[in-house]
Amino acid sequence: MSNLERDPAEVTECSNAEPLADIQVLEPREVPLGGPRAMTVRRTLPSKQRSLIGAWCFLDHYGPETVAATGGMRVPPHPHTGLQTVSWLFEGEIEHRDSVGSHAIVRPGELNLMTAGRGISHSEVSTPETTLLHGAQLWVALPEAERHRLPSFESHVSQKVEVGDARIQVFMGRLAGVEAEALMLTELVAAQIDLPAGGTVELDVTASHEHGVLVDSGRVSILNRVVEQHELAYLAPGCPTLTLSAGDEPVRLLLIGGEPLGEKILMWWNFVGRTHEEVVSYRAAWQAEALGEPGTATPAGLEDLFVPTLPGTEHFYEGGPLPAPALPTVRLKPRP
């Protein structure tokens, strides 16, 4: 998924900070996905309070949306660098195409993982059969040693297990004795957890990792704190177990986590880099290669970064690629 804000945050260099408390609850902000009938997403990462949970640097939560009313998801070809996109659905289907020739349908219970590496572009469109669209899009910042790797795409069925009252689908990393097949370039975990009304589960987690709990439906109690629907709870390292207790209605949530990244990143629009100059170069390459913007030229070393070059890898998207927003008038710099 693209960040379709007209004015992406100008100040987006970020790093993991010391925890403010044992648990920190982040409220979502609403962001339209573009167009006159824009589907609205709820964004909890990045936020003013926190930019990273492990290497997780972006979380959009959307739906359930009636496609007839919103038009569904229609995200034109757009670029990414230095990250992995993690697509997870509760309802509906999304068609994915990218510049390395991948063509896949994102379905509930299946992970679609795109590793941008040095550069990739892709489009996402809800299928004609989809009437309700409901899910989450997450990004993982790649560590310095891996962020220039060649791009790739993979799809895997989640690993299912029951623990206590919970039904768990693990789609990245290891949890509750099962391990997902997804490519991980830093230590991560991601799972959907469903609890019945009044249900409880105690999970063994890696004590040195940070964790986040996004509540999709219902409300859940964590460390004696009630986390409401659509909120994201952050848990600092230090706990070897995590207990989740549902209220008087069923709960569905996403658990994410990982080792603190330990690196500063600079994230602007759909690019994750390290310096202002790097992000400026990525934008110039996209505008020159994909849009043929007058007066732009592809920076040396970034040729063919985002545009399909092999026969059969065209996007097949009805409409043009998504132009990048204008760069800010100031240098991208650390968040205050």
Image: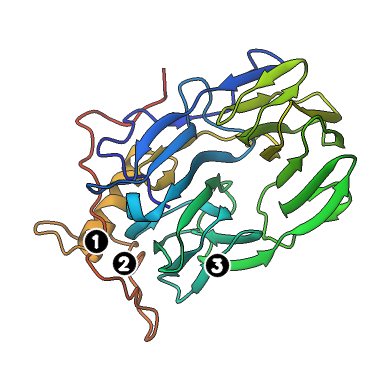
> Which image quadrant for residue 294?
bottom left
Can the viewer see residue 72? Answer: no
Instruction: Find numbered disc 3 in the image and state the secondary structure of the residue it sits on.
Output: strand
Instruction: Find numbered disc 2 in the image and state the secondary structure of the residue it sits on.
Output: loop
The residues bearing labels 3 and 1 have C-alpha atoms spaced at a distance of 25 Å
Tell me the kind of residue under disc 1. Thr
9 horizontally vs 56: left or right: left
Per the rendering, the mark at residue 227 is none
Instruction: Find numbered disc 1 in the image and state the secondary structure of the residue it sits on.
Output: loop
Tell me the kind of residue under disc 3. Phe
Q: Are marks 1 and 2 in contact (CB under 8 Å)?
A: yes
Q: How many marks?
A: 3
Q: Position of residue 216 (x, y in %)?
A: 60, 38
Per the rendering, the mark at residue 298 is 1
Query: Mark 2 or mark 3, which has the lower sequence index?
Result: 3
Per the rendering, the mark at residue 153 is 3
Q: Nearer the viewer, mark 3 or mark 1?
A: 3
Q: Position of residue 113 (x, y in %)?
A: 58, 60
157 horizontally vs 129: left or right: right
Q: Nearer the viewer, residue 252 or 51?
A: 252
The residue pinned by badge 2 equals 303
Tell me the kind of residue under disc 2. Glu
The residues bearing labels 2 and 3 have C-alpha atoms spaced at a distance of 21 Å
Q: Residue at x 35, y 74 (%)?
A: 308
Q: Position of residue 330 (x, y in %)?
A: 23, 28
